[in-house]
Amino acid sequence: MTALRVLSVASEAFPLVKTGGLGDVVGALPEALAREGIETVTLIPGYARVVEALRERTIVRSYDYLHGAPAHLLAGQAGGLDLLVLDAPHLFARGGNPYVAPDGADWPDNAQRFAALGTVAADLSQGAVPGFVPDVLHAHDWQAAIAIALLHYRGGPRPGTVMTVHNLAFQGKFPRDLLADIGLPPHAFSADGVEYYGHIGYLKGGLALADRITTVSPTYAAEIRSVEHGMGLDGLLRHRANALSGILNGVDTVVWNPATDPHLVSPYDARRLARRAANRAALQARIGLAPDPDALLVGVVSRLTWQKGMDLLPSVLPALRALGGQLALIGAGDYELENQLAQEAAAEPERIAVTIGYDESLAHQIQGSVDVLLVPSRFEPCGLTQLCALRYGAVPLVARAGGLADTVVDANTMALAADAGTGFVFAPGSVDALGFALERAALLRRDTRAWQQVQRRGMKTDVSWQRPAEQYAALFRALVAERAG
Ligand code: ADP
Ligand code: GLC
């Protein structure tokens, strides 16, 4: 099989820059695709830390003027990735979050910042850098979606285009008077182009014009065609149903391996589950929980937002209290939620530990210690923390939504009788259903043997990138073949 070349375009890539699962996926997929004979070059913005990390960098193209000032396109390696980095300090060399200014509002020039990224992606797609001609342009989320629209309206030869939706809630919606500034012709502002309820929609344009659309789980691929979950784009997604499919995410099984995890005081595997007890004691000491070896220890590793159902947590605490449980949470997000959860912890520090912030090490320690990893999302395109939890023997307790529904098998009575079940699944958005699932978990945990079987089944579940990579590879190859034929 001939090697196929993919230009992957995104606004983040782990380990260089990550605000959530998008970064994990963009960072991990290339290596898995390489095993399928697919070469990936990843184009990301030149945030200061990305430019600093780039090794053996060369300038492969220069722009005299790109949305306000000169810019360079750098090639090099970092974080195990073959990278093209858009070094445009006037757009990307800023402190803080890639999307949001320190005052909490979106950067006011996000339309221009990601139009610049899209322009460079479109140039690369049409052979702007000698020796590099991609077969597929793979755009992730709204920040890259505009590349597909720019390419479409230029005309001329182009690679196949694939739009991957990681989260339909973030759409990149901008005023219509920016059309020319973005680099689009007047006729692009139409129902079958980038026009979106009187605005310019970056994601809308990508969804309308991509050859293929994928999202990160089969259930989410179905859900987003409904009014309830379509976030205004369901009509378009129904129209494009033949081009739309769901491919589950994986996790990096080297980064997430309980047997070798450097963040754990006591690494373990499915045969040595007793070793988790030392991690639990260390976690309880680190975050100030009572040193109780028996309490049902529930973990949360999450953005603190409505999507993640984090506003339900205060109402669930009475049920947890009644079960004698403890909560270990690491998260950051909405200011009000952060405060509310911190207050709950301050009132009951031996039972509820809330760490506000972003901390990879604590995330690993929670996964390596807790009995139950709670993911109560209202909607969840895929979700990665429940996959990590499966691998770590932290029994996932999840809402029945999107990728959560696709990855956790409910350990109900009949499932257990059939030697199945890897976690607990409840109706999204319902505090009562969540409380009932917690009760079921607490009850099952009293039966150590049955509980360990659930843990071990989870740990045996294949959460690696292998199967997803095979599916992406098949999709890319079919697209290229179709376009060649
Ligand atoms: P989303 O991308 O919607 O936030 P995912 O579950 O797909 O949700 O991915 C979240 C990723 O970010 C996971 O790798 C998770 O471990 C990590 N993560 C989320 N919040 C934190 C945090 N506060 N500290 C450390 N890691 C976090
Ligand atoms: C988004 C989604 C999450 C998904 C991640 C990676 O952030 O919210 O469900 O796992 O992207 O695809």
Image (cartoon, rainbow, N blue to C red):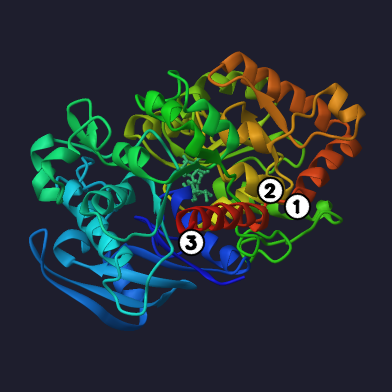
Name the image quarter holding residue 464: bottom right
Q: Residue farthest to the front?
A: 485
Which residue is at a point 53% across and 32% down the rendered structure image?
A: 220
How far apart in space, not on screen, are marks 2 and 3 (Cα)? 26 Å
Which residue is at a point 14% across and 45% down the rendered structure image?
A: 108
Between 380 and 441, which is closer to the camera in this rendering?
380
Q: Amino acid at mark 3?
A: Gly
N-terminal label among 1 and 2: 1
Instruction: Report helix, strand or loop for mark 3.
Output: helix
> Circle 3 sits on which residue?
27
Asked if 417 appears above or below 86 in the picture, the reply is above
How far apart in space, not on screen, are marks 1 and 3 (Cα)? 29 Å
The disc placed on residue 276 is: 1
Point out residue 34 in the picture as x, y percentages from the top left corner. 57, 69
> Circle 2 sits on which residue?
369
Asked if 230 appears above or below 251 in the picture, the reply is above
Between 347 and 194, which is closer to the camera in this rendering?
194
Asked if 448 appears above or below 459 in the picture, the reply is above
Point out residue 201 in the picture as x, y percentages from the top left corner. 25, 36
Point out residue 474 in the picture as x, y percentages from the top left corner. 60, 55
Looking at mark 2, is its residue's CB closer than 8 Å to ligand 1?
Answer: no
Instruction: Report helix, strand or loop for mark 2.
Output: loop
Between 423 and 65, which is closer to the camera in this rendering?
65
The disc placed on residue 333 is: none
Instruction: Report helix, strand or loop for mark 1.
Output: helix
Label count reads 3
